[in-house]
Image (cartoon, helix red, strand yellow):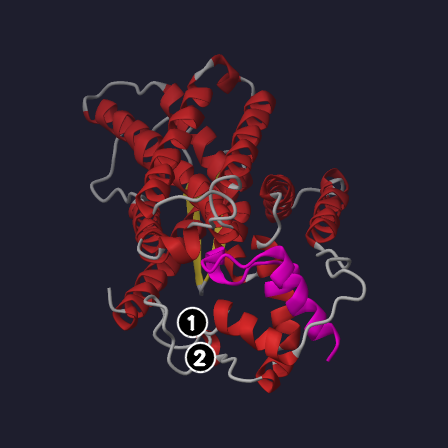
Amino acid sequence: MDPFLLEWLNILVRWGHLVAGIAWIGTSFYFVALDLSLKNQEAWEVHGGGFYHVKKFLSAPPNLPPDLIWFKWEAYLAWITGFGLLILQYYVQADLFLIDPTVLPLLPWQAIAISVVSLFAGWLIYDGICRSPIGQHTGWLALCVYALIVIAAFNYGRVFSGRGTFIHIGAFIGTIMAANVFAVIIPNQRKITAALLKGEKPDPKYGAIGKQRSLHNTYLTLPVLFMMTSNHYAIITGYPQAWALVGLVVLGGGVARHFLLRTEVHDDIAEIAWTIPVIALCLVAAVMLTEPSKSLIPAGLKTSDAEVMALVQTHCQSCHSANPTDANIKQAPKGIMFASTDDLKHYARQIEAQAVRNRSMPLGNKTHMTVEERQKLGAWLAAQ
């Protein structure tokens, strides 16, 4: 596909994904907060110059109004556009963004097959855990779901590139969340609706199951947002032990969401104060884990200007030049070009961070840049 058209498709689908995601997260946050703030199953709210009187029925109302509003397309469209982005960014350009031959030398079709199978397998395993006896015990269920995500991160990190790993953890969680809506929450609501239309009393278990999955979704929201934005930061995607970082993000993000939820319903801060040190510890641990090694370059190593330009020509100029030769790149990323040593000096900090310390460049290590070559590049940069 022409890189110019691919870029436009990418930005349009990304835009749609953001819009759908904002709508889904907004309605999810609102309804969870509303449910927690109801007093005697009723709530009075004020917004935008109007007053709203909301009432909740524990199982279902005695009859249904003709204008019942369903909230489902926000979730469906968020997943559809998200999967579309996965196709455009990581499947069409698998050799750049998804595959790292130093991690596992895969063909594009193999990487794509692993991606698709793992996403749906993740949902089936999660759903099976929820439907098992474990699903009746909130604490054990939370622990199992947490373990499932960390195990998925561990396996992705041994198959895909750094970017591919983190975006797939986000897609893994996002697929679970969207499938909760599509396969559990909405079908259960339809069963309740059908019973009401027949004049029957709905089974309250359908509402309880739907609420359980809805709470899972809201606690996973902050972690999934982190994963989806992580590929913009080499300090995240360049960290080789993705599972450890993911574990901290899921734990810290889930606790942060709990803090926000309880704050929204005006819980006493003393009751939720425990969340603050947990969030802080997760953040500090994540920062410490991702700090790149400062002892990468052997003492006494020297690299000449001619040697460093030869390295750059081999590993960087196929993308970072006035006329990129890489078939997937039409213009130099961010307008950065390496035509001379002066250009290297100008972007020294970025090169040192992404090509030497974090090893996130070249993309997917498509040119097979070795550790020794990174050390030579780092030695030249350090001498400037």
Q: Which span of residues is magenta-colored?
A: 355-384
Dot 2 amino acid type: Ser
Residue 216: percent from left, percent from top: 49, 35
Asked if one can make out residue 43 in the rendered structure from this viewpoint, the answer is no
Q: Main secondary structure of the magenta part?
A: helix
Mark 2 and mark 1: Cα distance apart in space: 7 Å
Q: What's the residue at 34%, 29% (across, down)?
A: 184
Residue 3: percent from left, percent from top: 30, 69
Q: What's the residue at 70%, 50% (across, down)?
A: 283
Residue 87: percent from left, percent from top: 31, 52
* Towards the viewer: 257 or 44: 257
Q: What's the residue at 74%, 49% (across, down)?
A: 280
The N terminus sits in image quarter: bottom left
* Towards the viewer: 58 or 192: 192
Dot 1 amino acid type: Ser
Q: Which residue, given by chain and number where applicable, does mark 1 sit on?
A: 318
Q: Which residue, given by chain and number where applicable, does mark 2 sit on?
A: 321
Q: Secondary structure at mark 1?
A: loop
- In the displayed structure, does residue 2 sit left or right of residue 19? left
* Towards the viewer: 2 or 327: 327
Figure quadrant of residue 196: top left
Q: Residue furthest right?
A: 299
Q: Secondary structure at mark 2?
A: loop
